[in-house]
Image (cartoon, helix red, strand yellow):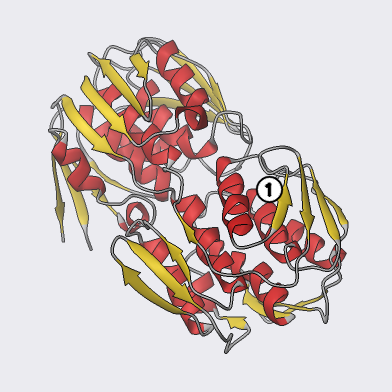
Amino acid sequence: MSKIIIKGGQSLSGIVKVSPAKNAVLPIIAASLLSKTPCLIEEVPDLADVRTICSAIEFLGARVEKEGAGLKISTPLVESNEAPYEFVRKMRASFLIMGPLLARTGRARISTPGGCAIGTRPIDLHLKGFCLLGADIKQGQGFIEARADQLVGSRIYLDYPSVGATENIMMAASMARGATIIENAAEEPEVVDLSNYLNTMGARIKGAGTKIIRVEGVEELTGSEYSVIPDRIEAGTFLAAVAVAGGDVVVDNVISGHINPVLAKLQESGVDVEDGEGYVRISGDGGLLPTDIKTMPYPGFPTDMQPQLMAMMVLAGGTSVITETVFENRFMHVNELKRMGARIKVSGRTVIVQGVEKLTGAKVKATDLRAGAALTIAGLAAEGTTEISNIYHIDRGYEKFVEKLKGLGADIIREE
């Protein structure tokens, strides 16, 4: 069992470069199944989730090769239509191969998905979209099977702006006959990035980043070279870490427009933020003001930053209120923060945080990906030593997390 061990109290300084976005690169890897000719993704983060989805598409017949910092993906033939449980149980994003498989081969059989246990994330919107595109869906024995001799464009209204459903339907519709209109679509930057990637392959997609996406189906897609956007959640995590620990850090490779809600909350908390061209500089002395947060679909405050900002608020001078509207079980890190001395009260989907003067190092466990990041942030400011277990969650979404923090001056090690 690997652990992260932190001795708190060190301020941070220097420059840290943000990796390509995990939540953008995963659907882009899945979309590469749509092409019979090779695709090159120019820079890909070395993450457990990336390795999982690469293993899944290799099982289907793709050849995945390292090409410098990137990946070359070739799928001249799809040899299997099934993504088994061993891949999908690790990461629900593996379900994103269903749309490309259905469009490419007319059949897909996928195990019901797993991933972080942060709440119910039903796949009914994905399946609704496939049905409206003309697929026949059957479920049973832990699998979902979809068949379609020819997908046909349709008007699809999403009851909720699900990122995964928007992406899966968009990929399937890219090779359907005729036009598809996706209404109440997710507006996240990762959706836009996938749309841009598909368009470089020859797809005809307009409106990504708005609530209405129009897809004009084409007969085939061809391989392309593509560079993935920076990871806005990783950027926000490092910004929160500096806000808590104090110091002066330049977070490089950032599209600041993607993290405007996070920057706004940091400024409300009394942190000095400089929004530059491709970077954000943050400085502070660790003295924080309370602020209220309500998570919302993009362009609202991201649920993936809620745990990290909670770790900030436990050290703010006053009372903060955090409301989680996206996932109903995203407060599992609360009890771990309490072990370090935080004063937090949970009431349904709302948390009341009463700031404390100090946290104390303790043995805690990462309950999910972003919870692990939050506990690391808390550990940077805590007195004494913090030991975080279950860090495989962190490995799913942060590339060289310990090394990057150590490079900023944190007293942090990874113990295998």
Q: Position of residue 301 (x, y in %)?
A: 55, 29
Q: Position of residue 179 (x, y in %)?
A: 85, 58
Judge whether residue 389 can be spotted in this image. yes
Q: Nearer the viewer, residue 48 or 197?
A: 197
Q: Quadrant of residue 307?
A: top left
- Residue 404 shown left or right of residue 258 in the figure: left
Q: Quadrant of residue 241?
A: top left
Q: Nearer the viewer, residue 247 or 347?
A: 247
- Residue 182 shown left or right of residue 40 in the figure: right
User: Callout 1: 10 Å neighbours few (<14), some, many (20+)?
Assistant: many
Q: Quadrant of the N terminus?
A: bottom left
- Residue 69 shown left or right of residue 118 in the figure: left
Judge whether residue 123 can be spotted in this image. no
Q: Is residue 59 above or below residue 297?
A: below
Q: Is residue 144 above or below residue 209?
A: below
Please tell me which residue is depicted at 35% across the width and 45% down the height of the picture: 372
Q: Is residue 355 above or below residue 350?
A: above
**Label 1 sits on what residue type?**
Ser
Which residue position is annotated with label 1?
A: 162
